[in-house]
Amino acid sequence: ATAEKGGYEHFMLKEIHEQPKAIRDTLAGRIKDGLVDLSQEISLSAEELKRFDKIHFVACGTAYHAGLIGKSVVEKLARIPVEVDVASEYRYRDPIITPSTLVVVVSQSGETADTLAALREAQKAGAQVLGITNVVGSSVAREADEVLMTWAGPEIAVASTKAYTTQLIAIYLFGLYLARILETRSESELAEATEALLKLPKQAETLLEDPSAIRRFAGDIAQHEDLFFIGRGLDHAVVMEGSLKLKEISYIHSDAYAAGELKHGTLALIEEGIPVIALATQKAVYDKMVSNIIEVKARGAHVLGLGLEGDDELGKSVDEVITIPETLPLLTPVLSVIPLQLLAYYTSTARGLNVDKPRNLAKSVTVE
Ligand code: G6P
């Protein structure tokens, strides 16, 4: 029945297209007079927020990838050291948790067993836990000391899309709020970032208008069994999510590499015709990224470059280009992940696979 899928063939495609609204809903009511204000939702006082000397992001799967972005965002905005762990490892590595640690657990369902166990462990060690979750009344929502909801609405497809982008939004909101309280960024910088945040729903809409180039590339990679994603900085975290998405629903093996690390091993795997998806949205490392692209091109890779609108250079070093609307470097993941979600989707359908229910995977894993 396509009716329950809002006219879309699969829940995943519907949910990809719901992202502009999900982002808008997650921003709603959290920005006042041009600045982020979470004081209605987060009960920690300014004094208490100032006491945290480190932050741990703990999560599984796609939510872990949101945590990787969280590290860059919070460190950059609030200048507090951040670690990121997969929940199934966290408890067993004897992490240093103290009462001045803030543990942020990220979970769409709020019911993932590993994540819940990490939450409880952190509380036992005296840490404060902030839960970022999409389900009101879920275990994470009930047990965390502080909760920041993502308002993505129900996510049915096993491969997470709108939950991830709204987790990023919640992380930006938290980072900007923390920076405001800690005064680690000037008010004008915060206002500029907030304004850019508010533009994201419209930009995501634009991005979804014409998937034809991605669809073409998907038809091509559907013929392969191995490929690579590369990126630097935040683009590295985003390609990890893009690679996961593709593996989950197309069963094509891919590796997501920090592009500067290629020559330390993985470059050996690049051979004639292998598809490489290269993200180049981060201005600070743009030239380095282009050199890395040239390295794989020289070994015969077929490269899809993903860059910012108005970048006329990228096309010279790759085989195909897709672009995302321009935003602040810190915010690009919200937009750059969307073409990667579509790429995974169209590759899966090109292979005739069960997009919404991939083999061996569950939407929410409630056993450890
Ligand atoms: C499962 C799902 C993933 C998801 C992960 C964490 O493995 O298949 O898509 O990212 O759980 O789920 P959560 O609900 O905690 O975000």
Image (cartoon, grey):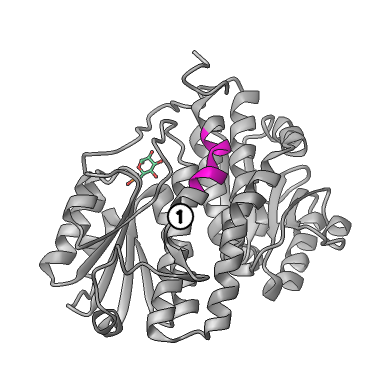
Q: Quadrant of residue 68?
A: bottom left
Examine the rendering and report whether any part of residue 187 can be seen: yes
Seen in the picture, residue 246 relative to 322 is either above or below; the reply is above
Q: Position of residue 121 (x, y in %)?
A: 15, 62
| Residue located at (44% from left, 31% from top) | 157
Viewed as shown, does residue 165 lie left or right of 288? Answer: left
Seen in the picture, residue 27 relative to 53 is either above or below; the reply is above
Residue that numbered label 1 is attached to: 28
Q: Amino acid at mark 1?
A: Ala
Q: Is residue 314 or residue 44 the one in the foreground?
A: 44
Q: Is residue 27 or residue 242 the one in the foreground?
A: 27
Picture quadrant of ligand 1:
top left
Q: Position of residue 34 (x, y in %)?
A: 53, 70
Magenta residue check for 16: yes
| Residue located at (29% from left, 62% from top) | 41
- Where's the C terminus, which quadrant? top left
Ligand 1 has an atom within 8 Å of the beta carbon of the residue at disc 1? no
Viewed as shown, does residue 365 lie left or right of 99? Answer: right
| Residue located at (70% from left, 49% from top) | 276
Q: Position of residue 365 (x, y in %)?
A: 28, 38
The secondary structure making up most of the magenta span is helix
Number of numbered discs visible in the structure rendering: 1
Q: Which residues are magenta?
A: 15-23
Q: Quadrant of residue 340?
A: top right
Seen in the picture, residue 151 relative to 343 is either above or below; the reply is below
Magenta residue check for 24: no
| Residue located at (71% from left, 38% from top) | 209
Q: Quadrant of residue 278?
A: bottom right
Helix, strand or loop under label 1: loop
